[in-house]
Amino acid sequence: MTVYEEIFEVIKARKKQYQEGTAEENSYTCYLFDKGVDKICKKVGEEATETVIAAKNGDNDELKNEINDLLYHVMVLCANQGLEWSEVEKVLEERNEKIGNLKTFHQVDKNS
């Protein structure tokens, strides 16, 4: 199991705790589920902006932290919407299979 899969499982467990009313009082993830999709989307947007700023500043230490913040909030969004992380990974795997096919795809038969 990858670290992303492990984190996603924790996020789903927090969602279940929130839904059952057994959430830990100081759980940030449960707080996000409580506030709903608008708050979660706002956080995704904020973290995306902070990721861009870190990249533009050339600060890789800041960048790697912001990327992880962004990925965490994207995972919360997925869990909130009932989208499994494995579904996201599957799309990436499908796209990875197409890498290298671009040159073949754009070849034109000049005889026609």
Image (spheres, rainbow, N blue to C red):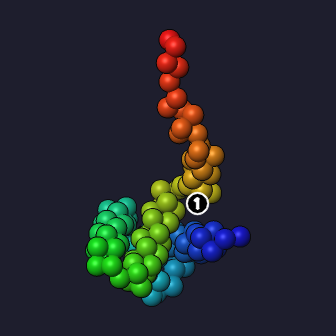
Figure quadrant of residue 103: top right
Residue farthest along the right direction in this orientation: 1
Q: Nearer the viewer, residue 64 or 31?
A: 64
Q: Nearer the viewer, residue 53 or 69?
A: 53
Q: Can residue 82 be seen?
A: yes
- Vertical placement of 80 versus 6: above or below? above
- Relative placement, left or right, of 55 versus 9 is left
Q: Residue at x 53, y 70 (%)?
A: 15
Q: Can residue 87 be seen?
A: no
Q: Mark 1: give few (<14), some (14-19) or many (20+) Cα within 10 Å.
A: some
Three-letter code for the amino acid on which mark 1 is drawn: Trp
Figure quadrant of residue 54: bottom left
Residue farthest along the front direction in this orientation: 111
- Relative placement, left or right, of 69 versus 22 is left
**Residue 111, image x, y percentages:** 52, 13
- Vertical placement of 103 versus 95: above or below? above
**Residue 91, image x, y percentages:** 57, 49
Label 1: which secondary element? helix
